[in-house]
Image: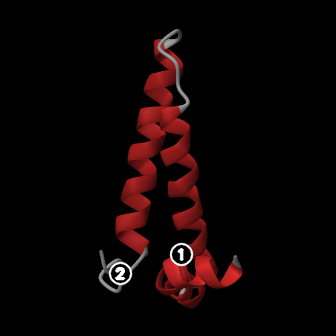
Amino acid sequence: MKRDLMTLFGDQLRWFMRLNYKQRFCVLYFCLNFFLIFSVSEDNLLWAFFVVLNFGASVRLLKRHVPLNDLED
């Protein structure tokens, strides 16, 4: 199982391990907000607006602090 996961995500994990702690925090913050945006219901629009704004802030931090040109498709 571990070998299969390493063949699938090995390049991304090596890229993640090369980042410093601030960059890792930005990546994890983006991932948290990415999954949070799918869990928002339409019941409370203020909460949904806050989640979308927070996601935008995480994208801005990711683009500013994390070198994304080392990743491949």
Residue reaching furthest to the right: 2
Callout 1 crowding tier (Cα within 10 Å): few <14, some 14–19, many ≥20:
some
Q: What secondary structure is marked by label 2?
A: loop
Q: From what the image shows, is residue 40 above or below residue 35?
A: above
Circle 2 residue: 71
Q: Residue at x 48, y 41 (%)?
A: 54
Quarter of the C terminus within the rendering? bottom left
Q: Are marks 1 and 2 in contact (CB under 8 Å)?
A: no
Q: In the figure, is residue 48 to the left or right of 28?
A: left
Q: What secondary structure is marked by label 1?
A: helix
Q: From what the image shows, is residue 59 above or below residue 62?
A: above
**Which quadrant of the view contains residue 71?**
bottom left
Marks 1 and 2 sit apart, C-alpha to C-alpha, by: 14 Å
Give the numbered dot on residue 23.
1
Amino acid type at mark 2: Leu
The residue lying toward the viewer, choosing from 58 and 28, is 28
Quarter of the N terminus within the rendering? bottom right
Colouring scheme applied when the structure was drawn = secondary structure
